[in-house]
């Protein structure tokens, strides 16, 4: 059934409650791998100090205010299950405090929140952003899926009456063999049932398989308060700046790309939406910023224009990042170079924290403060036009 939700015009708070290397100009190793190295060099107490310092500094109340000023109405909040589930079926108050604060700040500034399980127990894909150390055990071990369902039931029961809650994004970018999509479908079905046993009013977002691209198999799950979520970064070699000097509009990977080509790429999702009377939410889209010299602003405006034409809600990836030469940039970017960014290498970004934490904690923490980030007004203006 078609939802009666308001138009989602959102921003992702990537890299905060689910740490990603490139957002801190580092290698894209799993968060857990980075923390193991940190703990080995500095000890457990130092690791706890690092985690708390980072999460207390990287995003604060003033960032929620910034997002409201930009004109967005929604925050997609990616989190690692390990922030909350410190051991199987045990939910830690310290981790939950960050979610509690997020709801309080969001309500203060008139924002809605979508909780996004970005890294599930066992990892739902083999990428760093699933906090995967080599294998996606989420699909191999039923206990991992059951833990995720219990986690969602707990979170739904805890936050169901929050005025700033919009809904639950059950699983970020699941990746599994097409022949095994039945496993994902069953997980969604069971999670929906558990969530709706405690919360029947808020939205449940279902992402397609293969990095939120394939959605046809989800049509049987559509019912009241279900929204289908996709991610859109095409053409990837351009938006991620894998092939340098590509421009938009123009020929990218041997194919002509312009607004009409974007419209064509997104049309199947629009047709799915109309056929199944369901909303489409683009949970992630964005671009690596190269000074605006390669059509980045025009690309964003074209994508947003097509989203608007098709009636898709959307959330930009991401709010804040250390400026990098690959992967989508932040609306707020840290532009300077220093010993903890170290663009010249040989060690880049966050791995420089490890040998320097004890002697340079103050300078490292200062790097994370938004006051040291520059707002990209071209991105902001493009987003504001469609807010």
Image (spheres, rainbow, N blue to C red):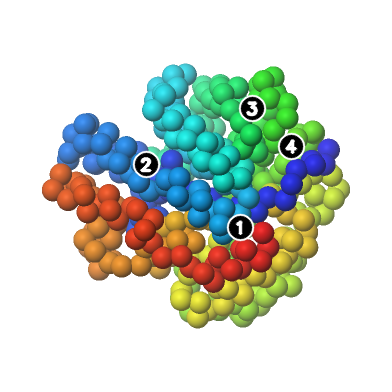
Of the image marks 4 and 3, the number of the one nearer the N terminus = 3
Q: Is residue 169 left or right of residue 196?
A: left
Crowding near pointer 2: few (<14 within 10 Å), some, many (20+)? some
Mark 2 to mark 1 CA distance (whole Å): 24 Å
Q: In the shown orientation, is residue 279 left or right of residue 251?
A: right
Q: Look at mark 1 in the image and give the residue it sits on.
A: 71
Give the quarter of the figure containing the N terminus.
top right
Q: Are marks 4 and 3 in contact (CB under 8 Å)?
A: no
Q: Quadrant of the C terminus?
A: bottom right
327 over 196 or under it: above or below? below
Disc nearest the viewer among 4 and 3: 3
Between marks 1 and 4 in the image, the one whose residue lies nearer the viewer: 1
Q: Position of residue 354 (x, y in %)?
A: 21, 47
Residue at mark 2 to residue at mark 4: CA–CA distance = 31 Å
Mark 2 lies on a secondary structure that is: helix
The picture places residue 286, in percent across and down from the top left corner, at 55, 61
Residue closer to the observer: 249 or 372: 372
Which one is earlier in the sequence, the residue at label 2 or at label 1? Answer: 2
Q: Secondary structure at mark 4?
A: strand
User: Residue 226: which numbered mark, if any?
Assistant: 4
The numbered mark, 2 or 4, whose residue comes first in the sequence reads 2
* Callout 3: SS: loop
**Residue 163 in sight here:** yes
Label for residue 161?
A: 3
- Report the number of discs: 4
Can see residue 169? Answer: no
């Amino acid at each position: 059934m078609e939802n009666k939700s308001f138009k989602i015009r959102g921003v992702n708070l990537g890299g905060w409650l689910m740490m990603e290397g490139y957002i801190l100009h580092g290698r894209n190793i799993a968060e857990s791998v980075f923390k193991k190295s940190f703990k080995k060099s500095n000890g457990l107490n130092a690791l706890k100090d690092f985690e708390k310092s980072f999460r207390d500094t990287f995003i604060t109340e003033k960032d929620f205010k910034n997002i409201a000023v930009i004109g967005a109405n929604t925050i997609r909040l990616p989190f690692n299950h390990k922030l909350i589930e410190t051991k199987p079926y045990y939910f830690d108050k310290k981790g939950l405090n960050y979610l509690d604060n997020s709801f309080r700040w969001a309500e203060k500034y008139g924002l809605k929140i979508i909780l996004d399980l970005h890294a599930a127990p066992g990892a739902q894909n083999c990428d760093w952003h699933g906090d995967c150390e080599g294998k996606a055990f989420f699909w191999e071990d039923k206990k991992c899926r059951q833990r995720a369902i219990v986690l969602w039931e707990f979170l739904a029961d805890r936050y169901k009456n929050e005025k700033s809650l919009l809904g639950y994004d059950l699983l970020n970018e699941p990746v599994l063999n097409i022949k095994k999509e039945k496993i994902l479908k069953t997980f969604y079905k069971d999670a929906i049932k558990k969530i709706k046993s405690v919360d029947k009013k808020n939205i449940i977002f279902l992402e397609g398989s293969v990095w939120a691209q394939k959605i046809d198999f989800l049509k049987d799950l559509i019912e009241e308060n279900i929204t289908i979520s996709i991610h859109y970064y095409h053409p990837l070699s351009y938006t991620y700046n894998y092939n340098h000097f590509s421009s938009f509009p123009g020929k990218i990977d041997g194919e002509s790309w312009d607004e009409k080509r974007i419209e064509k790429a997104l049309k199947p999702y629009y047709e799915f939406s109309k056929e199944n009377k369901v909303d489409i939410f683009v949970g992630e889209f964005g671009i690596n910023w190269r000074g605006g010299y390669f059509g980045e602003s025009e690309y964003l405006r074209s994508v947003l224009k097509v989203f608007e034409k098709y009636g898709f809600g959307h959330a930009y990836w991401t709010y804040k990042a250390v400026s990098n030469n690959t992967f989508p940039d932040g609306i707020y970017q840290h532009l300077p170079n220093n010993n903890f960014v170290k663009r010249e290498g040989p060690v880049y970004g966050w791995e420089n924290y490890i040998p320097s934490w004890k002697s340079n904690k103050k300078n490292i923490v200062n790097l994370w403060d938004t006051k040291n980030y520059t707002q990209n007004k071209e991105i902001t203006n493009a987003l504001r036009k469609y807010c």
